[in-house]
Image (spheres, rainbow, N blue to C red):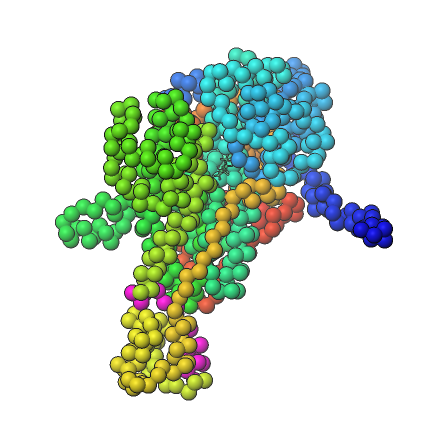
């Protein structure tokens, strides 16, 4: 480099515009960090008290009563103004405290604000108090790895997405030894309380720790986090106590912005079907919300398939006086047919493009796959137990795993006596493409959950869709409808007899969208149809305009697949999530200061306007039930899945046909607002929440 250019570069690098434009922090980030979320009015009063909400109860699981005896009788508590506290109580409220916080599980937008809320409130009542953040999730607690949360650390993360402040992890505290390690860490830090910010499994951890820490006096509070939206709590009496976990709104809006951009592209370029897989292990809440936010043409809600019955098959079987068991429950084949049906209908109304949303957890509701998942869970767990080895380490390759399964089906492997993988299972499993087998055999997470995000579900479904569309095309059932007005224009321009040709080539010449007859599937068959109708002679050629029409009616199925998950999880929080999470942090502190343990901090009336929000504590033990994990039943918090009787689902069901846009030329796509931290926009709450509150 010459001296001259070196000088020039220095000038360029030192230029204020360069340093401004290339700074790590932009104006929006600075404004975001400086934004102060709204606080629920109650927190303006100096002290708070807990008032039990005895009208809200839960059905207590027997096993929970046995394993969590000291927290099972907790009731739902509401935070109320603590004006009547005596001097001693006030002093206790303001004690110098050490509070530990942990992020657990997948990131969810707003987590940093929970910590900000805890930090601000802790310091407000006693500046001597300390907040510690355990690093990399529950592992930090077990390994005593932590940082002291400082004002500058909090300020750098206010209203910002992710869990980067202290990171997260999925370690499970599932043995007496681990619980002792956790207690040791908490005692060495002289903690008064531990706050676990996590999903269903992490709040399960919180309940067991609350029970185990009871004698030590260390309180344990959970906070409902997960973009999946599957922590929703209703009391036995039907009162909504927690309408949604935090992070859900942001992730749904972030996904929806992307999906909505695809609807714009699809309807401009009119050649692609965009297939979007959207995160949400098991529950389809995110897909339902994205459907409302975008009005995508087809959104599949897994829960709807759980009780799917194929009436056509049942009727057919009835005639033959047999029972067709395959008619009960959704199969991958059924599902691909359902999608093809939508594609066919839109093509018939002139639209060979569109957007489909598939929930990541849909496989949970596909009968045949669900059976594989359960069986494989058990096989892997049994192998690990019987051989005291790790299945995935013993069989690192798919081929070796398949080989083990084959031996199992032939009774040649040691299963401890139970034969759950038979020859038929092995045969069916081997019919699946390798990439999908690999997905189903993927290692379970630490909590024993099947890792849906690792499976290319959209690919297997699409492959089946493509195959069947090929068959339908050959049968002349997959065709693009031609707008009658455009047909008239083309024929008039070419000075051809539009009515005569229409009768010869279209199924219904009077319909709005004209569909070529089923038997016209090639130039040859088109020619034959024209000859048969005496429109042209046998040795005459097809007029160019008609050939052009035939080309227009010939569909090509072009797809693009997308996966929305990690991107939305990492998004900065929406205004709703900023406010929600900050107030969750404040609530967690007040629960602790009032001596609660084994409670999950929550905000009641989230589905209503901010002024109606109420901070409460929900007894975690009351939410527990037994669930199959790693081949055995374990006590965990029950996931909430899409309720098919909810307002949101019923409205979706009533409107979804409109989003197919079969009748009109115009699609009904909706543009969701941007992810914003401030200002009240119309997007101030999840749409599903608004509907469910009606
Ligand atoms: P949490 O339940 O921990 O909040 O995580 C939810 C989730 O984002 C799911 O939507 C997804 O299936 C899963 O995490 C992905 O897990 P991983 O981060 O291990 O890939």
How many circles with numbers are drawn on the protein?
0
Between 526 and 217, the residue placed more toward the observer is: 526
Part of the protein shown in magenta:
475-492
* Residue 450 location (% of width, % of height): 42, 35
Residue 356 relative to residue 99: left or right: left
**Can you say whether 191 is above or below 533 in the image?**
above
**Can you say whether 346 is above or below 252 in the image?**
below
Q: Residue 234's image quarter? A: top left
Q: Residue 94's image quarter? A: top right
Q: Residue at x 36, y 32 (%)?
A: 377
Q: Residue at x 27, y 41 (%)?
A: 427
Between 151 and 94, the residue placed more toward the observer is: 151
* Residue 547 location (% of width, % of height): 39, 78
* Residue 538 location (% of width, % of height): 28, 84
Q: Residue at x 67, y 24 (%)?
A: 148
* Residue 642 location (% of width, % of height): 42, 42
**Can you say whether 450 is above or below 288 in the image?**
above
């Amino acid at each position: 480099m010459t001296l001259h250019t070196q000088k020039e570069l220095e000038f360029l690098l030192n230029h204020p515009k360069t340093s401004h434009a290339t700074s790590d922090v932009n104006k929006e980030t600075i404004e975001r960090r400086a934004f102060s979320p709204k606080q629920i009015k109650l927190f303006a009063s100096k002290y708070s008290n807990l008032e039990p909400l005895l009208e809200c109860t839960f059905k207590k699981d027997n096993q929970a009563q046995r394993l969590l005896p000291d927290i099972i009788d907790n009731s739902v508590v509401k935070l109320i103004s603590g004006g009547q506290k005596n001097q001693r109580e006030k002093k206790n409220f303001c004690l110098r405290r050490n509070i530990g916080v942990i992020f657990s599980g997948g990131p969810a937008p707003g987590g940093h604000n929970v910590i900000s809320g805890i930090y601000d409130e802790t310091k407000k009542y006693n500046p001597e108090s300390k907040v510690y953040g355990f690093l990399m999730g529950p592992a930090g607690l077990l390994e005593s790895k932590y940082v002291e949360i400082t004002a500058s650390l909090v300020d750098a993360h206010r209203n910002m997405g992710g869990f980067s402040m202290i990171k997260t992890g999925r370690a499970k505290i599932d043995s007496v030894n681990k619980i002792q390690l956790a207690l040791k860490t908490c005692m060495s830090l002289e903690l008064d309380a531990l706050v676990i910010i996590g999903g269903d499994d992490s709040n399960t951890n919180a309940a067991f720790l609350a029970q185990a820490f009871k004698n030590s006096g260390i309180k344990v509070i959970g906070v409902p986090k997960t973009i999946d939206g599957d922590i929703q709590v209703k009391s036995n009496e039907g009162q909504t106590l927690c309408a949604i976990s935090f992070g859900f709104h942001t992730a749904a809006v972030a996904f929806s912005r992307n999906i909505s951009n695809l609807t714009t592209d699809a309807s401009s370029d009119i050649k692609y079907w965009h297939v979007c897989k959207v995160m949400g292990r098991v529950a389809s809440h995110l897909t339902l919300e994205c459907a409302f936010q975008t009005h995508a043409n087809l959104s599949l809600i897994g829960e709807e398939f759980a009780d799917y019955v194929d009436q056509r098959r049942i009727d057919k079987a009835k005639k033959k006086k047999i029972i067709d068991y395959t008619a009960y429950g959704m199969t991958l084949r059924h599902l691909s047919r359902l999608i093809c049906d939508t594609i066919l209908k839109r093509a018939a109304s002139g639209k060979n493009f569109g957007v489909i949303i598939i929930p990541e957890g849909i496989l949970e509701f596909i009968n045949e796959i669900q059976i594989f998942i359960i069986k494989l869970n058990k096989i892997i767990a049994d192998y690990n137990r019987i051989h005291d080895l790790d299945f995935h380490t013993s069989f690192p390759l798919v081929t070796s795993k398949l080989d083990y399964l084959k031996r199992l089906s032939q009774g040649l492997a040691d299963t401890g006596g139970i034969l759950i993988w038979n020859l038929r299972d092995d045969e069916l499993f081997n019919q699946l493409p390798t990439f999908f087998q690999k997905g189903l055999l993927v290692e379970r997470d630490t909590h024993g959950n099947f890792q849906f995000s690792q499976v290319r579900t959209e690919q297997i479904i699409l492959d089946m869709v493509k195959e069947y569309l090929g068959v339908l095309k050959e049968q002349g059932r997959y065709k693009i409808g031609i707008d009658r007005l455009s047909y008239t224009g083309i024929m008039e321009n070419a000075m051809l007899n539009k009515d005569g040709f229409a009768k010869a080539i279209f199924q219904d010449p009077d319909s709005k969208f004209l569909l070529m007859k089923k038997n016209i599937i090639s130039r040859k068959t088109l020619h034959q149809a024209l000859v048969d109708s005496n429109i042209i002679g046998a040795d005459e050629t097809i007029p160019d305009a008609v050939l052009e029409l035939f080309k227009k009616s010939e569909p090509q199925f072009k797809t693009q697949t997308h996966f929305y998950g990690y991107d939305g999880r990492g998004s900065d929080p929406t205004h709703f999530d900023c406010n929600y999470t900050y107030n969750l942090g404040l609530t967690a502190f007040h629960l602790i200061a009032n001596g609660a343990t084994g409670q999950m901090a929550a905000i009641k009336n989230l589905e209503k306007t901010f002024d109606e929000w109420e901070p409460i504590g929900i007894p975690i033990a009351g939410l527990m039930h037994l669930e199959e994990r790693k081949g055995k039943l374990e006590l965990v918090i029950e996931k909430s899945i899409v309720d098919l009787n909810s307002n949101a689902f019923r409205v979706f069901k009533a409107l979804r046909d409109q989003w197919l846009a079969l009748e009109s030329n115009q699609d009904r796509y909706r543009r969701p607002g941007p992810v914003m931290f401030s200002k009240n926009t119309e997007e101030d709450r999840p749409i599903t929440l608004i509907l469910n509150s009606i």
